[in-house]
Image (tube, rainbow, N blue to C red):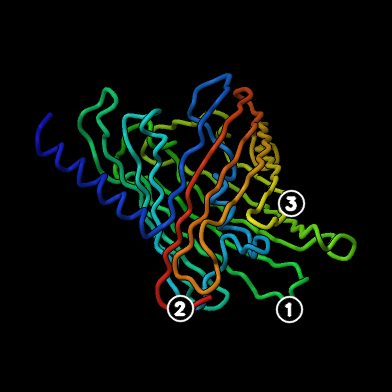
């Protein structure tokens, strides 16, 4: 291997690990049982993406809406790529609280060969994501909290085929959370949440390359779940359904179940850095077959500016 390529690869890996120390690190799902390939899709995305959509997630405030004027930097290297791909993907992004109710974010993903596969050379940028979320403040703690947002994602440059589905995605959504059964069972500390959204596809110059159980056209999706706080952790159970029947000529359906546990490793009050361990499982049924998987991630949030929360 060319020494220059080896140096560039090591430098990129080092930068990715440094970014983890000041951002949010989310690992890929690990497929345990599958009737197809190991390149899976779980609409509307990973659990970390759902956390960023829904407002006021439980008493632990995951992810917690940052105060006005504050920035949150993050990176989420896909370390599952060391097993499943010839390239390691390293997204880097920033979330900015413009006003008390408006957040904007942008993310760019880079990639480089890790040397564990058949490909020796290659690095660059493969994806750009931009979006925003509007979250009005509830009148009381018992009110339903709402968030309205949209994301746009597009491939950039000409990355390797395995790193992109070859399409641009426009993804509007509405999400909500609300305490439930607080009158009858206040000790349970239950919070219900839900999200409804769409995934509008447009062709890019790249060839199509859809993942396992990823719908091949425009689709609608819905997520419903319930979360509960215990003394040392927060547990949740999500049901996801996606269909292309209502807004396209295709009739694909994807259904999935996802139990998750979030364990705070640091106290949340008055900190600029928060560390949360997230463990989960996933069972998916779709047009490509059935799939069972598990996931684990370490979410680190580093915030700058603004006042402490």
**Residue 308 x, y percent position in the rendering:** 49, 77
Which residue lies under the disc numbered 1? Answer: 139
Please tell me whether mark 2 sits on a helix, a strand or a loop.
loop
The residue positioned farthest toward the top in the image shown: 35
Please identify the quarter of the rendering in which residue 165 is found. top left
Instruction: Estimate the spatial distance between the alpha carbons at disc 1 and disc 3, rounded to whole Å.
Output: 22 Å
Residue drawn at 58 percent across, 75 percent down: 101
Which residue lies under the disc numbered 2? Answer: 69
Residue drawn at 50 percent across, 47 percent down: 169
User: Which quadrant holds the C terminus?
Assistant: bottom right
| Residue placed most toward the observer, 111 or 73 | 73
Please identify the quarter of the rendering in which residue 41 is found. top right
Tell me which label, 1 or 3, sits earlier in the chain. Answer: 1
The answer to whether mark 1 and mark 3 are in CB contact below 8 A is no
Tell me which label, 2 or 1, sits earlier in the chain. Answer: 2
Tell me which label, 2 or 3, sits earlier in the chain. Answer: 2
| Dot 1 crowding, Cα within 10 Å, few <14, some 14–19, many 20+ | few
**Is 111 positioned to the left or the right of 29 in the image?**
left
Residue 226: mark in rendering? 3
Please tell me whether mark 1 sits on a helix, a strand or a loop.
loop
Up-down: is 236 above or below 284? below
């Amino acid at each position: 291997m060319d020494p220059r390529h080896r140096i560039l690869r090591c430098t990129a890996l080092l930068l990715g690990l440094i970014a983890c120390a000041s951002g949010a690190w989310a690992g890929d799902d690990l497929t345990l049982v599958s009737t197809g390939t190991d390149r899976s899709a779980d609409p509307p995305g990973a659990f970390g993406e759902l956390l960023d959509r829904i407002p006021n997630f439980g008493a632990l405030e995951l992810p917690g809406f940052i105060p006005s004027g504050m920035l949150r930097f993050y990176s989420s290297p896909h370390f599952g790529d060391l097993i499943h791909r010839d390239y390691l993907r390293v997204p880097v992004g920033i979330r900015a609280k413009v006003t008390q109710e408006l957040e904007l974010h942008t993310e760019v993903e880079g990639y480089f060969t890790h040397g564990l596969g058949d490909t020796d050379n290659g690095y660059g940028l493969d994806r750009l994501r931009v979006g925003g979320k509007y979250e009005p403040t509830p009148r009381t703690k018992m009110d339903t909290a709402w968030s309205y947002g949209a994301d746009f994602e597009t491939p950039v440059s000409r990355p390797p085929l395995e790193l992109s589905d070859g399409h641009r995605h426009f993804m509007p959504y509405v999400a909500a959370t609300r305490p439930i059964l607080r009158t009858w069972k206040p000790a349970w500390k239950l919070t219900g949440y839900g999200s409804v959204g769409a995934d509008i596809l447009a062709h890019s110059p790249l060839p199509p390359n859809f993942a396992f159980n990823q719908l091949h056209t425009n689709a609608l999706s819905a997520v419903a779940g319930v979360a509960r706080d215990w003394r040392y952790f927060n547990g949740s159970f999500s049901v996801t359904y996606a269909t292309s029947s209502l807004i396209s000529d295709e009739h694909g359906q994807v259904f999935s179940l996802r139990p998750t546990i979030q364990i705070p490793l640091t106290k949340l009050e008055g900190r600029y850095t928060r560390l949360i361990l997230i463990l989960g499982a996933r069972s998916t049924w779709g047009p490509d077959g059935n799939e069972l998987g598990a996931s684990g991630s370490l979410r680190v949030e580093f915030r700058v500016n603004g006042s402490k929360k």
